[in-house]
Image (cartoon, rainbow, N blue to C red):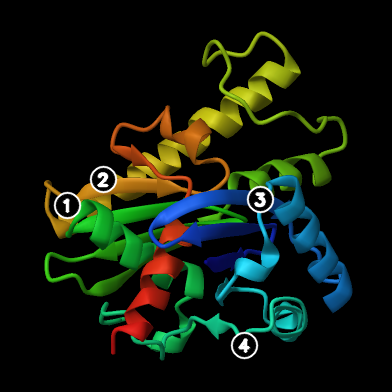
Amino acid sequence: MLLAIDVGNTNTSLGVYDREELVAHWRLTTARERTVDEYGVHSRNLFELAGLDFKAITAVAIASVVPPLNFTLRRMSEVYFHHAPLFVDNTTDTGVPILYEPPSDVGADRIVDAVAAIHKYGAPCIIVDFGTATTFDAINERGEYLGGVITPGITISSDALFARTARLPRVEIKRPSSVIGSSTVGSMQSGLYYGYAGLVDGILKKMREELGEHVRVIATGGLAPLIATGSEFIEEIDDTLTLDGLRLVYERQGKK
């Protein structure tokens, strides 16, 4: 079985694959201060709760955008799962040409998202990943990674609004019942939700004009189900896109 780990700035997702089947997956808070042993014990506890045998893991694949954690996760994989992990980056053979300059600036999560989107939905396509930052990735009809757009995530926007204003409270990010808020909280929720949905669709409209009207749009990331409901252009929500991409990239290495 394969253990796939997607390390983001806010959350870390883990998935266990038995060949092509995702048999378990978890989303955790990314903790930069956590030690090798803490990650190892935590991972084993998750396996136990899911009724899985950690000794059945035969490989580990990692996409990380948090470099300080790379050594910790490498040692965790070696000590607790007895396998040197595959770290995906722009030099990994993924089958997707990267036309971004420089290619090393493309995050591992964006690379494996592209691999999975092409495999599952075809090209051309646009992937919107709602993470700490919201990223928009463009894949042309030849399956080449062109680049995209990076914007502050909706949680960053919410935190900045709370931090930089004296009287506005921190609010839950949710879709309000109406655009016109009848309270301060409702007004803030409306601004965050509909403002962000408008940002997403405004960018997607321009990207579709450049790529062509028939491009598919796939959303992933923790807040994808929330924001996608307010989008005119998002067609698919895929919670496990990044983990699936890790599996596909790992399998490609064994076929070379």
Residues at marks 1 and 2 touching, judged by CB atoms closer than 8 Å:
yes
Task: Give the SS element for disc 1.
Answer: helix
According to the picture, the residue beneath numbered tag 4 turns out to be 84
Task: Give the SS element for disc 3.
Answer: strand
Q: Is residue 226 above or below residue 51?
A: above
Q: Is residue 30 above or below residue 73?
A: above
Residues at marks 2 and 4 touching, judged by CB atoms closer than 8 Å:
no
According to the picture, the residue beneath numbered tag 2 turns out to be 205
**In the figure, is residue 29 to the left or right of 120?**
right
**In the figure, is residue 24 to the left or right of 66?**
left
Q: In this rendering, does residue 35 appear at all?
A: no
According to the picture, the residue beneath numbered tag 1 turns out to be 209
Give the distance between the C-alpha atoms of the residues marked 2 and 3, in whole angstroms.
31 Å
Task: Give the SS element for disc 2.
Answer: helix
**Which amino acid type is marked by label 3?**
Arg
Q: What residue do we see at 28% from left, 90% from top?
A: 256
Q: What residue do we see at 73% from left, 48% from top?
A: 160
